[in-house]
Every structure is written in C-alpha cells, then in structure tokens.
Image: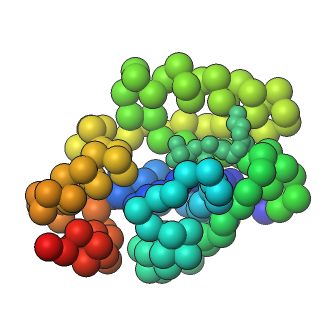
Amino acid sequence: MRKAVCPGSFDPVTLGHLDVFARAAEQFDEVTVGVLINSTKAGLFTIDERIELLRECVAPYKNIKVESFQGLLVDYCKVNGISAIVKGLRAVSDFDYELQMAQMNSQLGVDTLFVATKPEFSFLSSSIIKEIAKYQGDVSALVPTAVNKALKARFKK
Ligand code: PNS
C-alpha cells in the first residue's frame, strides 16, 4: 500500500489545502493529513478544533484520514509506513523554504512530492484568511463551509 502524508498547521484548512489532499488521494492508496502539534505556537483554533474541521472536510474521501503528530515528520512517516510527503507549492516565494525542508527530509529518509497549487488558490494562506475574517471580510469562496462558520463564530463582534 502506497501511503503519503500532507503535513501542516492547518489553522485553519483552506480550499487550497483541500485541493492538494484530493490530488494526493488520486495518486496514493492512503493519505494522512498530519496536523503538527506545536506547543510553542498558539493558534486561532486548538489542535482538536482543527482536526474536527479537517475530518468534516475530508469525509467524502474514503482514503484520506486526519491525525496529529509531534516531533520530526520523518519519524512519524517511518512509524506509520508512509513513504512520501506531499505538499502544495503556491509560488516562487514558497520555493526556498520548501526546497530546504524537502532536501532535509530526503536526507533523513523520506522524499517530498510537490503539487502545483491551482492558480485560483495560489494567493491563499491560513494567515491571510484569518486576517480577512478577523475584520469580518468575506472568505466564503476560499474556505470550506464548516471553516467559514467556525471563523465567523470565533470573530463574532
Ligand atoms: O503549515 P506549516 O506550518 O507551514 O507546516 C510546516 C510543517 C508542519 C510541514 C513543518 O514545520 C514540519 O514538518 N514540522 C515537523 C518537524 C520537522 O520534521 N521539522 C523538520 C523539517 S525539515
């Protein structure tokens, strides 16, 4: 069985992330969305909230599951028999950082495959979504419905 992981903070998940998960799920038998537990960085949503939102969003995909992990991503991959990391590449600005991580992870034993983000999602990030939603801007076309609802509740005036 060919298994891949899509790792990230997903605070919160966007339609850009979902597109990458779905495309990874076409290439692999099983895809795990791996939510990083980072005790030094408080997010807008807790890890449990992010996982709940993610699980709701990937429910239609039978071969995508959502888990959290801490420590090194490559260790998580090795323990779980995952042979590839799949990440979305939005623009040249992502490239330096992503290349460095991919090369390091490759050195540590797990290769990374990049999916070119669809142009309609290339400007999207969780941070920019939070910034807009904080001031009641409309992000409904950019995030799953459940996330839009959760953002509205979090930033309710
Ligand atoms: O959504 P993010 O915050 O950009 O995702 C970053 C993530 C989770 C992919 C990266 O920080 C990660 O893999 N962290 C786990 C720790 C690790 O393995 N670090 C070494 C990377 S070379």
Q: Is residue 105 above or below residue 36?
A: above
Q: Is residue 130 above or below residue 50?
A: above
Residue at the right extreme? 79
Q: Residue at x 56, y 29 (%)?
A: 98
Q: Residue at x 23, y 44 (%)?
A: 120
Q: Is residue 96 above or below residue 71?
A: above
Q: Is residue 139 above or below residue 49?
A: above
**The one of 59 and 151 positioned closer to us in this rendering:** 151
- Scheme of colours in the image: rainbow
**Displayed quadrant of residue 108:** top right
Position of the C terminus, as image quadrant, is bottom left
Q: Quadrant of ligand 1?
A: top right
Position of the N terminus, as image quadrant, is bottom right
Relative image position of residue 152 (x, y in whole percent): 21, 73
Relative image position of residue 130 (x, y in whole percent): 29, 55
**Displayed quadrant of residue 124:** top left
Q: Is residue 61 visible?
A: no
**The one of 83 and 57 positioned closer to us in this rendering:** 57
Q: Residue at x 60, y 60 (%)?
A: 35
Relative image position of residue 123 (x, y in whole percent): 27, 38
Relative image position of residue 138 (x, y in whole percent): 12, 60
**The one of 60 and 15 positioned closer to us in this rendering:** 15
Please indicate whether residue 59 sits to the left or right of residue 70 in the image: left
Please indicate whether residue 32 sits to the left or right of residue 70 in the image: left
Q: Is residue 89 visible?
A: yes
Q: Residue at x 14, y 57 (%)?
A: 135
Please indicate whether residue 109 sits to the left or right of residue 93 in the image: right
Count of numbered circles in the view: 0
